[in-house]
Image (spheres, rainbow, N blue to C red):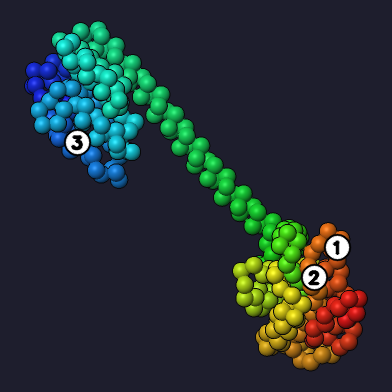
Amino acid sequence: MKILVVDDFENNRLLLEKTLNEAGYEELILASSAYEAFEILKLDDTATEVDIDLIIMDILMPGLDGIEACSHIKEKEHLRDVPIIMITTKNETGLLHEAFRAGAVDFIVKPFNKVELLARVNSVLTLKKEMDRRKAREKELIEVTRKLEEANQKLQEQTSIDGLTGIANRWAFEQYYENEWKRCMREANSLSLIMADIDVFKAFNDNYGHLAGDECLRQIATVLQQSLKRPGDLAARYGGEEFVIVLPGTDQAGAQIVAEELRKKVEEKNILHEFSPVGDRVTISLGVASGVPHAGLERDVLISRADEAMYCAKQEGRNQVKVYRDGTK
């Protein structure tokens, strides 16, 4: 344990050094003033870790007394846990109240009683060791907690992201959709869904192979996600070659515009599909459903309506957007 002794009288410093050395405390630093102690402690250098376990400091010193010095030290966050024992004489004991208010933890009366001195030093250092152990355990706990949070975040991302396309998966969509449904219900705001399906994808897969099919899914997912303008909009893989887009705070007219933009962007991607009756490129069919969530409306109704509208788009020739309107498309 490293001890800093601060006393303007050399004889006192040497006596303390000798007594503490004989008791087995060999790492001692001596300072003749508060200012010299501040330099040793690197008072204003918060980036440097101070390797001092105990300060023994005289109350009365020229220039800056021990009480003021103690107060300055305790103001520094990086020095706050370093215990300070004050050295006083019997006729100075009235100053101890001020010393304790400044942050001192104990005192020694001079002339020193060796047994009392060592008992007080040992007691304070024992407490310091326990504090250091607790701080180390707290630091370890904070680090473990941080790592657990990172692991949980990664796990959540893994369970929320579709492994093939890299966008949100169906589980993530359902969680997000439920939250946005409740939020829009509270705010009496519109909520829109777009269901999108790759046209004649089975023929694409059968003729170009599953690797090409997987790459096609990835490219379509990227187009859908990158085409959304607002942070609150979500594109997710719903299953197979089907995707879903959540548009909070968007009415039917706005959702229809977004859907048409998505359709165009996919077509402009120019992914070759020679086996499609629609054309020689990969296209998508989209269904739009919108509404203002309320207590009398089932949460899944927008999903079924958007799906129904999408089915209608496929039935009527594919590569188009259909909107669900009060039971009719």
Instruction: Give the spatial CA distance, label 3 vs label 2.
Output: 69 Å
The tag earlier along the polypeptide, 1 or 3, is: 3
Res. 39 in view = yes
Q: Residues within 10 Å of mark 3 (few under 14, many from 20)?
A: some
The residue sitting at the front extreme is 188
Tell me where residue 209 appears, x and y as whole percent.
77, 78
Q: Amino acid at mark 3?
A: Phe
Instruction: Give the spatial CA distance, label 2 vs label 1.
Output: 9 Å
Report which residue position mark 1 lands on. 297
Q: Residues within 10 Å of mark 2 (few under 14, many from 20)?
A: some
Q: Quadrant of the C terminus?
A: bottom right
Report which residue position mark 3 lands on. 38
Horizontal side, residue 97 vs residue 61: left or right: right
Q: Amino acid at mark 2?
A: Gly
Q: Residue at x 79, y 86 (%)?
A: 319
The tag earlier along the polypeptide, 2 or 1, is: 2
Tell me where residue 286 appears, x and y as whole percent.
79, 79
Tell me where residue 325 appears, x and y as whole percent.
86, 78
Report which residue position mark 2 lands on. 291
**Hey, which quadrant is residue 236 in on the image?**
bottom right
Instruction: Give the spatial CA distance, label 1 vs label 3.
Output: 71 Å
